Amino acid sequence: MGPRLRGDDLERRGIGVAELPKLSVRLSGAIDPRQCLGLARIAEANRYHSIWFAENAFARGVLPAAAACAAATRGIGIGIGVFNPYNRHPTLIAMEIGALDELAQGRARIAIGSGIAASTERMGLSADRPLAAVRDAITIVRAMLKGEEVDYAGAVFSARKVKLDFPALRPDMPLLMAARGEQALALCGRIADGLIISNLCPAEFTQAAVLAVGEAARQAQRPAPTEVVQYIPCAVRLDRAEAYALAKAALGEMLASFWSLGERVPAAKAALLRTKALSESDFAAAVARLRAGERPAEALDDRFVEAFAIAGTAEDALAQARRYAQAGASELVLTFAGRRPEPDMQYLANAARGSR
């Protein structure tokens, strides 16, 4: 097993001074809404900051589960990340997030992104001009939440004299943006209130992305977004080898599709290759082995875990989380690996409370 950052290693490298980022839990349309409800209650009881719902094309829509969790909890944030304006018009995004925020009494959170073009096109929708689409969506949603009558002609989406029929609970609700490429990161810095970063983006990417967003904000003469929310797989167990095996299984489910996306979208491949530990040939070889039917535990070595997951004992995981904080992430949204995430969520939360 390769070297990994432990707490004392971080101190020697000057990273130990970093505070822990906020720790949140990722749910998705792959999970039964009733199970989401139970996980949300456990997350709140263990003082996780938020639960985030990832809505992927053709899986369960996340609004029913998000609404149920909002009604069943009292303090935890309820995030939707991301909404895609191609299949949910910006006016509808404003209507739905405004209503969810009322139900959650000011705890709703939202990120907007252009989604995956291939999935959007399978719906018979055009995914042209993704940056313009996100700019239009954020412009329309922000104005509607403020209670304005919106008369906006955008490059992709427009709104003709529309206004919410109810006052939004938070007219200034922060709007985060999903971004990965250089132009998207620059747009995020110019118009968004925060950045959301996808799975399979290493800490080296996080650092570069935060710098790019901050520079774009500076050039636009606006404050740099302070919320940097990053999705990442998580496998924590008392047995480090068991945790690494779980992490490899989780990464194995994602890597081939992310690599295929990278073959079509240069920014996606560039994000993967930001890690210093793995070369392009390492990725290509691992993906080929996975596609040939090899188990992730055999096809992926520990470098993949250390670049793209939070894994190991709770102590290991917290040290790795601090590395992302040092890179600029303010919040890590953890997808807990395994069939029964509840004890792992509790184990990590207990360790986090003891280390703050």
Image: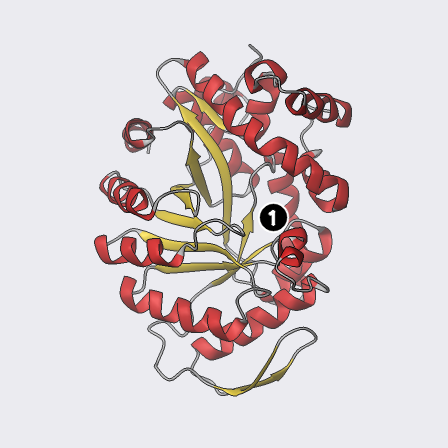
- Residue at x 60%, y 66% (from the top left corner): 191
Q: Quadrant of the N terminus?
A: top right
Q: Is residue 221 visible?
A: no
Q: For mark 1, what is the residue?
A: 210
For residue 53, above or below residue 260: below
Q: How is the image coloured?
A: secondary structure
Which residue shows up at 66% across the image and 25% down it? 291
Q: Position of residue 102 (x, y in %)?
A: 30, 69
Tell me which amino acid carries mark 1.
Val
Which type of secondary structure does the marked residue at label 1 adopt? helix
At horizontal 70% and vertical 75% (from top left) the residue drawn is: 155
Q: Position of residue 131 (x, y in %)?
A: 68, 63
Looking at the image, can residue 162 be seen? yes
Where residue 87 sits, quadrant-wise, is bottom right
Pick whichever, 151 or 324, lies toward us: 151
Residue 22: give x, y in percent of width and height: 40, 43
Q: How many marks?
A: 1
Picture coordinates of residue 178 (x, y %)? Answer: 58, 54
Q: Residue at x 29, y 32 (%)?
A: 342
- State the residue lying farthest toward the top: 1
